[in-house]
Amino acid sequence: MFKRLQTIVCALAASSTVAAVAFGNNTSNDTQYLQVALSLHYVETAFYQQGLLHFDDQAFSDAGFEPWVRGRFEQIAMHGQTHTTTTLSALGNDSFSPCTYNFGSGLANVSLFVQASAVFSASSASRALYSQMLYQDVDNIIAAGAAGAVESRQAAWINSAVLKREPWSGPFETPLSLVGAYSLAEPSIVSCPDDYPDLPVRHGLPQLSFNTTIPDPGSFVKVQVSGLNYTGPKYLAWLSGPSVFYTNVRHDMVAAVPAGLQGLSYVALVSNTTATDLDNDLLSAFTYVDFIFNSYASNPGPSST
């Protein structure tokens, strides 16, 4: 289960289980994987630096947060900086300079900063989890696991103690490929320096959005993809824990939301449901949906049958 993602195809009215599908073909090396990690550490570090510079103690207080909340975000920013410097050290001469970033609405106010930070931490944990099966060097495997565990704790703290929502999605963390993680972060990248490497990711994937930011499990959404030039069959791939759920996208770009999803789910538009490499079938960048549930809800994880 942990080496392959179980796939579930959900039609608009019925669902069926199909063969397992791998998340990616791994033909790069540790240096390239570390370079992707560094590029994403740079994004997260810049986000916290800009956010904490922009929002002081009074701004957090005015937004309704207790005084100690900003102090914890200062600590999270320090953790991110340490992850960055550690990766720089591991890369040595293969390291590179950061890009220029614009976080748009993520820094519009304190509340949006806090919500975006939860996604940064959760997606970093998901990417680190996936990275552990890529690295060959045991030191890199351990470092990815150690950093990812802290990112997961940070996401749990932000969601529960700060946002008063669920601290986890279910019994298993959701792995997210380097391509998927980079696609989440790329809209924040404005320009990059000349020494920026050729990363083993896909650049410029169209952005995916829905007609509602908080759809209900089992409901329907209108799928919106900017600049999509593809006329074949389309599906939404919903990642939750070690499983990926597929729903058909109709000709009118309406699709079902799988029933039973809880917590954070990564979702992308894909071209089929039977491939052995989800990354290559992406028609859009990943986005995310948080299916909020309370402390009295049953939380065994989404059903795979």
Image: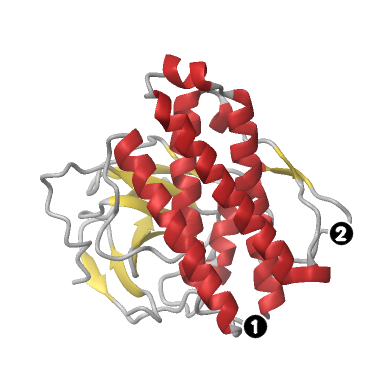
Question: Is residue 19 placed above or below 49 in the rendered structure?
Answer: below
Viewer-side label of 2, 1: 2
Q: Pinpoint residue 99: horizontal percent, then vertical percent.
A: 77, 47
Could you say which disc has been placed on residue 64 in the image?
none
Residue 189: quarter of image: top right
Q: Secondary structure at mark 2?
A: loop
Q: Pinpoint residue 16: horizontal percent, then vertical percent.
A: 24, 71
* Residue 254 in sight in this render: no
Q: Residues within 10 Å of mark 1 (few under 14, many from 20)?
A: few
Q: Residue at x 53, y 69 (%)?
A: 144
Q: Residue at x 47, y 50 (%)?
A: 121
Question: Is residue 69 placed above or below 195 in the rendered structure?
Answer: above
Question: Is residue 278 placed above or below 149 in the rendered structure?
Answer: below
* Residue 79 in sight in this render: yes
Q: Pinpoint residue 48: horizontal percent, then vertical percent.
A: 59, 39
Q: Residue at x 49, y 38 (%)?
A: 73
Name the residue type under label 1. Answer: Thr
Residue 171: quarter of image: bottom left
> Counting residues from the N terminus, which is met first, the one under dot 2 or under dot 1?
1
Q: Are marks 2 and 1 in contact (CB under 8 Å)?
A: no
Q: Circle 1 sits on which residue?
A: 27
How far separated are the C-alphas under marks 2 and 1?
22 Å
Name the image quarter holding the C terminus.
bottom left
Q: Secondary structure at mark 1?
A: loop
How many numbered circles are shown? Answer: 2
Task: Report the residue that reaches farthest toward the right.
Answer: 194
Q: Circle 2 sits on which residue?
A: 195
Q: Residues within 10 Å of mark 2 (few under 14, many from 20)?
A: few
Question: Is residue 276 placed above or below 170 in the rendered structure?
Answer: below
Q: Residue at x 25, y 59 (%)?
A: 170
